[in-house]
Amino acid sequence: MSETEMKTPPPLPEKLVEVRGLHRAFDKVHAVQDLSFEIHRGQVVGFIGANGAGKTTTMRIMATLDSPSSGSVLVGGEDVMQHPERVRRLIGWMPDSFGTYSYMTVFEYLDFFARAYGFKAKERAERVSEVMDFADLTPLAERPMNKLSKGMGQRLCFGRMLLPDPEFMILDEPAAGLDPKARMEFKNLVRILAQRGKTLFISSHILSELGEMCDTLLFIDAGKIVYHGGADQLRRGDGNGADGNAQIVVDVAVAGDPASLALWTAMNPGWKLLEQKRDGARLALAASDPADLAAGLRKMILDGVQVIEFHREERKLEDAFVEMIKKIQ
Ligand code: ATP
């Protein structure tokens, strides 16, 4: 690939990825069943599901490494089956495990792959150096691959994926086994790539790992999509998933005589006394739409209840996920 080609990629469609009716069976195991979703340019999508849910199978097909039993995947408008070589120019793939070559150092490994990607001479040295800086691999340049920790190995694999500066990055469990510090650093790298307009598709079986990193979540269970929406929507319970009609709950701290507050709560339908304090109480209101919520809060103020603080109660992502799975079973 020449320098000019790399610097002026062809315009990409807004819908960068289109998965339609994807199905993949291994003998009697239906790993992925009728999967359909879209990923828009610049999105950071978390692909979440338990072990064996079908994440790797889906990602391998998107990365042109496996063929669907039926259905299709388009990346950048190109079909992964019909034009895998065109798709490969757009994607970066970070597998959940990769082979190590004990005789190679970090630098040699990246240099080898940069050569394979067609970088030549000065351009190759520059690209390897940029990637090493970005993924914080420069201090490890001379370290043999078999002397890397799990986190360092993940960073090297990440660096390898970045070499051709792909538009769409598919990362299979990139944060698995990372300690909290390494996970924070990884999150930071994802944030920078997102700011540069890259599109990322990241899998994990640990929801909280992806909640903060991704703007969109895609849950897969037994080969089927069970939720596709924002992390915030899911915490609030107003996503488009199986619990799309969930209620909004506000938690309100109020001051005043606890007995009068208990009486007020009993006389106002919808309100619940969460906690009585020496000089006040905590009340909750569950409403199915924002207008009811606004009316409830207004009534409270008009009745002279002294509101000190209120916040919308957010569910933990894990709880939201478990609730949703229960509802669809
Ligand atoms: P994990 O989080 O454990 O990596 P996953 O969500 O990535 O799981 P997949 O690896 O896609 O799940 O597997 C989905 C199902 O397909 C599983 O039941 C698995 O055993 C099966 N499967 C995957 N690859 C093959 C294969 N090559 N041959 C037979 N069965 C397979």
Image: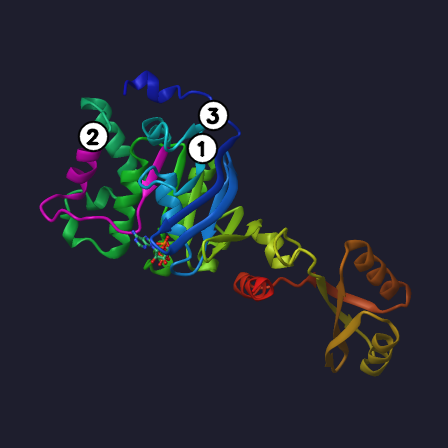
Closer to us: 85 or 32: 32
**Does 274 sit above or below residue 97?**
below
Q: In this image, 305 relative to 145: left or right?
A: right
The nearer-to-camera label among 1 and 2 is: 1
Number of other residues with Cα within 10 Å of mark 3, as a class: few under 14, some 14 to 19, many 20 or more: few
Q: Secondary structure at mark 2?
A: helix
Contact flag, marks 1 and 2 (Cβ < 8 Å) = no
Location of residue 107 in the rendering, given as x and y in whole percent from the top left corner: 18, 39
- The residue carrying mark 2 is 116
Of the numbered discs 3 and 1, the one sitting upstream in the chain is 3
**Residue 152 in view in this figure:** yes
- The residue carrying mark 1 is 74
Amino acid type assigned to the residue bearing label 1 in the image: Leu
Number of other residues with Cα within 10 Å of mark 2, as a class: few under 14, some 14 to 19, many 20 or more: few
Q: Which of the four quarters of the rendered structure image does ligand 1 lie in?
A: bottom left
Task: Indicate yes or no whether the magenta region holds residue 103.
Answer: yes
Amino acid type assigned to the residue bearing label 2 in the image: Ala
CA separation in Å, label 1 and label 2: 25 Å
**Does 276 sit above or below residue 181?**
below
Q: Residue at x 29, y 47 (%)?
A: 155
- The residue carrying mark 3 is 12
Q: Quadrant of residue 89?
A: top left
